[in-house]
Image (cartoon, rainbow, N blue to C red):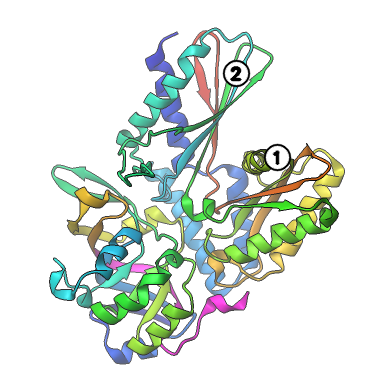
Amino acid sequence: MDQKHLEEGILQLIRKAETEIPPDVIIALKQAHSVETGAAKIQLEAMLTNVEMAKKKRCPMCQDTGILTFFVNVGTNFRETGLLKQAIEKAVIRATLEIPLRPNTVDPMTSTNHGDNLGSYLPHILWDFEPGDTVHIMTLPKGSGSENMSALGMLSPSAGLEGVKKFVVDTVKKAGGRPCPPIVVGVGIGGSADLAMNLGKRALTRPVGTHHAEKSIAHLEGELLEIINKTGIGPMGLGGKITALDVHVEVAHRHPASLPVGVVIQCWADRRASMVVHNDGSWEVR
Amino acid sequence: MEYHTSFPLSSEMLKKLQVNDVLYITGKIFTARDCAHMKMRTMKPTDLPFDPSVMGLYHCGPLMKKEDGRWIAVSAGPTTSSRMEEFEDILLDRFGFHLIIGKGGMGQRTSRALKKTGSVYAAFPGGAGVLAAEKIISVSEVYWLEELGMPEAVWILEVKEFGPLVVAMDSTGRSLYNHV
């Protein structure tokens, strides 16, 4: 397999994620635009114009090109697993120069900016395996405006689902206009502290408008969306009907004495793109 | 009301601007985020290599590229203003700028300082980086780039019809962010 060819594919994956918003998000934004008025409508109008301009000019839609997270599902029969990490890192360096991306990796000890979007543990790669001989890669660039609003609640199990709902809604209220609403809310329930946060982020990989396969979880998603949209925070916090485009919940089993809740908020520019890499080195960005 | 105006903003104009008004501004703005705010907090107006009093402050960490020796804004939407809450009253008082452009709103301290100095906070739609970059006609200057890096440096931007800006905190102390 030619590593350069693979790098080129991952570069295109990053470019697509940074410059084109997925169709499910556009539909949701248009829907929000149709129901809002005044300052809220002006925000959505500008967002939709910006989406079109970014695609046409092939420029990152937001100056905060984020920290890049890659969800990589490797087929157990894929032959060149060893190439993947390096190809991703090289593609990130190229993307920073060629798209370009804003240099966003800062050494926490010295505050120096690495300039290439690489750094200790970054880009963040979450590995998993799946049957087959292909690799599925999704990238989720996420800016700090929304990421800074994330929250972990280590609830007492006696708080129950009502406690979970309250924690999610309180987190959204506290965030207000800061994470660039209308937001998408990812919620992870159960597991451990780190797993709940991880599931919250993973929940954001699901398209807007889709529900969890499990009925009771889908019901919870719908309930949360309704409560959040009653807060009146609205687009960019200027007041309005649509504060969230969707809420996605993922669950893990929990310790009898723990009820972790991870809330990860995504901005309206819910950027993500996917690709598949085949065993012969060919790829498609979708 | 919708206004199309340029710097310098007269005190009459600033008084006229009320929450929910829409504003398009022409002239010079300077970007400053956390690091530039921390730096400016320790400085006097005469220490600065630029004059904030003739410009607007833009909470922004732009994505820039250099082409043929000139800086060009690629994507330049606003950053979250609340991070600057602990500095802004001091800066408003000391440096004499009267328009803050950002997103997500600011708190009580800034609101009081806006009232005291007769200034206004206006919101540019967050994430609309390409739309903002379109309204930047040139990059006049950059300061502290080496030291602070691209997002944190102070960029002096010449803008034309920069907006839509929604007046979200006005000089009478009203704020659109108090509804939650």
> Against A22, is A37 above or below?
below
Circle 1 — which element?
A: loop
Chain ID for label 1?
Answer: A
Chain ID for label 2?
Answer: A
Q: Nearer the viewer, residue A162 or A235?
A: A162
The amino acid sitting under disc 1 is Ser
Q: Nearer the viewer, residue B120 or A169?
A: A169
- Closer to the chain start, of discs 1 and 2, is 2
Circle 2 — which element?
A: strand
User: Which image quadrant for residue A278?
Assistant: top right
For the residues bearing labels 1 and 2, Cβ distance under 8 angstroms:
no
Q: Is residue A59 visible?
A: no
> Against A230, is A148 above or below?
above
Q: Which residue is mark 2?
A: A74
* Residue A244 point in image, percent of width and height: 65, 58
* Residue B95 point in image, percent of width and height: 24, 77
Q: Which part of the image, by quadrant, shows the C terminus of chain B? A: bottom right
Q: Is residue B132 left or right of residue A145?
A: left
- State the extent of the magenta-drawn residues as a range: B158-180
Q: Which residue is mark 1?
A: A192
* Residue B9 point in image, percent of width and height: 27, 83
User: Which image quadrant for residue B24?
Assistant: bottom left
The amino acid sitting under disc 2 is Val
Q: CA distance from mark 1 to mark 2?
A: 25 Å
> Against B109, is A61 above or below?
above
Q: Residues within 10 Å of mark 1 (few under 14, many from 20)?
A: some
Label placed on residue A138: none
Q: Is residue A285 left or right of residue A246?
A: left
Q: Is residue A64 visible?
A: yes
